[in-house]
Image (cartoon, helix red, strand yellow):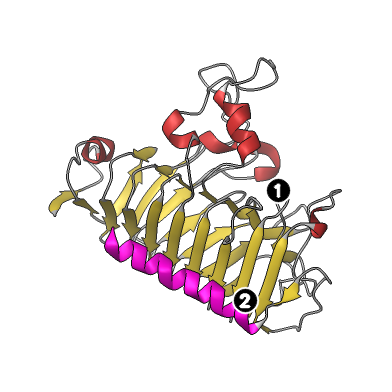
Amino acid sequence: MRIIKLTPADDVQAALDSATEPTKIILAKGMYNAKLWLKRDNVTLAGEDREGTVICWDDYARKPHADGGEYNTFRTYTLCVTGRGCAIENLTIKNINKDARVHGQCVALSVNSPLFKATGVDLVSEQDTLFTSPFPDDLVVRYSGLTDDPAYYDGFIPKEQLYMEGGSVQIFEKCRIYGTVDYIFGCAEAYFDGCELISLHEDRGHGFVAAPAHSLKQARGYVFVNCNFKEGGAAEGSVYLARPWRDFGMCKFIDCALGRHISHALYDKWNDTYRDKTCRFSHSGLRAEGGIAPVVWGREMTSAEREEALRGYEEAKAAWEKR
């Protein structure tokens, strides 16, 4: 494997683009003010120091773009990963824009890769911190310019960031993810193991950790295992574990610890919708400081469902090792 060592004075994007073989890029401690796109396969981006190696940018959804539109959620990322078999380790990725009420969504990490892993990473933003592609099918149509409706954005998201045939398997181990509203969202088969999900103060009243949008055809969605849902300023009882961004979104929570900021109901149905009838939310072995009284459509997992979810995680780890 090729090793490249960089400092904040170096051009990180140029190094990412030069990786034509399996490469590990090691970033020295420091602040990297850059908006980055990792396009190459089999690249690891690693920091010298988890808290001290920081990649940051400040785009936001309502910001005017050079093409005449707004940035929209999906162009606000600090780091976008589209290469297959890529990893990030031991660093912090921030979207440093503030006040999502005014500026809208502000993504820190966007992953549109068939196979990806993050280990010991801090992801910091307010609203929509982590996007786990694929996109919902209706958004692929909207953003690809396949329609004649002028209300749609014609091709304003690069093809490599928008399209993905098939699914995506993503693993997040021992990460800290910060946010307020829908701060983990998308359609990936994604596993969060030993992570801290830290809900920040939210003036709008309620926060939401996960906003899954999985298709009914997907048998596996988001799985949180041995995770700690922590209060980082959120009021008691003000945060829901998940709400479905699209019908059939899937979330499973296994052996997780919940702070008092998590609502006893656990889940919300997404505004004035009927997605409580279609979403697939379930849990097993939760440890809640204030107790729980889940909504009737948020089910306790059967032993077979729990075993299947954990088997999916083992298969994801095996796929990563074989990459």
Seen from this angle, which residue lies furthest left?
2
Q: Which residue is mark 1?
A: 246
207 sits to left or right of 183: right
**Quarter containing the C terminus:** bottom left
SS category of the residue bearing label 1: loop
Q: Is residue 199 left or right of residue 321?
A: right
Residue 187's place in the image compared with 155, above or below, is below
Q: Magenta stretch?
A: 303-323
Q: Is residue 254 above or below residue 274?
A: below
Query: Between 270 and 311, which is closer to the camera in this rendering?
Result: 311
Amino acid residing under circle 2: Glu
Q: Residue at x 64, y 64 (%)?
A: 251
The residue shown at (36%, 53%) is 54
Q: Hey, what amino acid is under mark 1?
A: Arg
Give percent across and percent down for residue 64. Answer: 58, 24
Q: Is residue 285 visible?
A: no
Q: Is residue 264 left or right of residue 196?
A: right
Image quarter of the N terminus: bottom left
* Label 2 CA crowd tier, 10 Å (few <14, some 14–19, many 20+): some
Residue topped by disc 2: 305
Q: Mark 1 and 2 residues: CB-CB less than 8 Å, in contact? A: no
Secondary structure found at label 2: helix
**Relative side of 126 to 115, left or right:** right
| Rendered position, 57 above or below 46 | above
